[in-house]
Image (tube, rainbow, N blue to C red):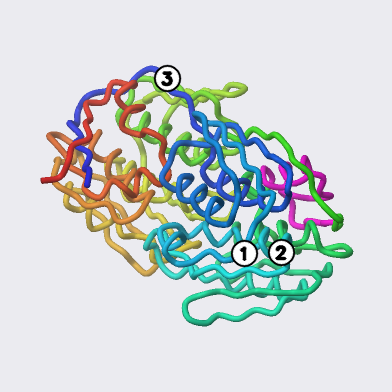
Amino acid sequence: MDKIRVHGGHPLSGSIKVSGSKNSSLPILAATLLTREPCVVHGVPDLSDTHYMLQILMHLGAQVERASGTVSVTAEKVHSVAPYDIVRKMRASVCVLGPSLGRCKEATVALPGGCVIGDRPIDLHLKGFEALGAAVRVEGGDIKVFAPKLKGAVINMQGKFGPTVLGTDNIMMAAVLADGVTVIEGPAQEPEVVDLANFLNEMGAKIEGAGTRRIVIEGVPALHGAEHWVIPDRIEAGTFLVAGAMAGEGVTVKRVEPEHVRAVTDALARCGYAVDIGDDSITILPNGEATAQDLVTEPYPGFPTDMQAQMCALLSTSRGTSSVTENIFPRRYMHVAELKRLGAKLRLEGATAVIDGVDRLLGAPVMASDLRASAALVLAGLKADGTTEVSRVYHIDRGYEHLDEKLMELGAHIERVKET
C-alpha cells in the first residue's frame, strides 16, 4: 500500500492541465450499454474508479479498448447482473442500473461501496425507476429492477439534502428508451449531468433542459454509437486552485471551464486572493494574508461538497475564525481529526466546522479517510513545516489523475513511497 510523503514549505509556481472529469466519465461510460454500436469517449482520466467501471462493463459483456485517455466500448450483447465483487469498491457503479434497465428491461446490481462520508441512500433512484413502471426489490444485498416496458412519467428528484446527481443520471439513462415523455422535476444541475445529457443526445436521445430545474426526455426506440469528449474535472481544478492559494507564488490551472468553478474562485477572492480568469485558464496569486470566511456547501451552482475538505485546510491558516457548514453530507468531516494532528484548530458544531486560523501547521503522519479528505491532507502538508505522510492514498487514486506528479511539476517536494 502506498503513502504520499510531502515536504512542506516549498512554493508552487507554473501551470498544469486539468484531466477529464471523473464524475462525467463514469455515467458516460455506463451509458455506452444503451446501444449495440461502438462508442468512443475521449478524455477519460486514468483513475482506479474508471478502471473499475471498465471492469464492470466487461463483466456485463461489453468489449472495451483503452488507449491513453480514449476508451472505445462496443456493447453488442450484454447481460444485466453486476455482482458485489466488482461493484463494492465504487459507489458510482450504481449508475449501470439505469442503462441496464433501459436496454435489457431488467438489472441486478449489488448495493455499492465507495467513500465513507455518511449515509448516501439511493431511494430516489429506485423511486424514479418505479415511476417509469419498473418493479424494484432489494434482497440479499442486491438491487433488482425489472419492467416489461418502461413508460414516461413525471419524477421529482429532490431529496432531504437536495437533488441526487447519480439519481438524475440513472433516470435519464433509463428514460431515453422509455415509451412517451419523462419529466424530471428538481434534477441535479451539475455540469456532469449536462455532459451526460449531451452524450446521450449525440447517441440519438431527445433530452432538453439539462442544467436547469426541469429536464424533459422524449423516449426513442433505439440509440446509436457516438464519439464524445468529457468535460474538464472541476473538482480537480478547484483543488489545484486551493493548492496555489495555500502554497503558491502564482499557479495557473489550464483546460478548465471557469463557470464550472465559479463558486470556488468567488470563495478564494473573498479570502483575499487575486484570481485572474481567462477563457479556459485560471491563475491564482497570493495577495497578502488570507482572511476568514463562512462557507456553506450547496448543490450546483453553490459551493461544492467535494471542495469542502480542501477549503477547511486553507482556512486553517487564514486570519480569524471561519465556519464551513456541510449541507449535502453532514457527517463528511473525517478530515477534521487529521488536520488537528497538523496543528489546525477546528471543532465541530453539528454539521458546521468552526476553524480558528493558526500561524503555521507542522508536519505529522496522517491517514486519509475518503477521496477529498485525502487531497485536503496533501494540501495541508504543502503548507506545513516539516514532513507530512499521508497513508491510504488509494483514496486519492480514485479521483485524481497523478496528483503527486502534477504537484511536482509545480515545484512541490512530494514523493510516493511504499508503506512498510
Q: Mark 1 — residue?
A: 80
Task: In the displayed orientation, state which residue is furthest to the top.
Answer: 14
Q: Earlier in the sequence, mark 2 or mark 3?
A: 3
- In which quadrant of the rendered view does residue 182 lie? bottom right
Is there CB contact under 8 Å for labels 1 and 2? Answer: yes
Query: What type is the residue that disc 2 sits on?
Result: Cys
* Amino acid identity at mark 1: Ser
Q: Position of residue 356 (x, y in %)?
A: 27, 51
Left or right, residue 349 beside residue 19: left
Reading the image, the residue beneath label 3 is 15
List x then y, in percent, for residue 191: 63, 44
Q: Secondary structure at mark 2?
A: helix
> The magenta stretch spans which residues?
194-217
Q: Which residue is mark 2?
A: 104
Is 212 or 266 nearer to us in this picture?
212
The reply to whether residue 163 is visible in this rendering is no
**Measured Cα–Cα span from mark 1 to mark 3:** 44 Å
Q: Nearer the viewer, mark 2 or mark 3?
A: 2
Q: Is residue 310 above or below residue 230?
A: below
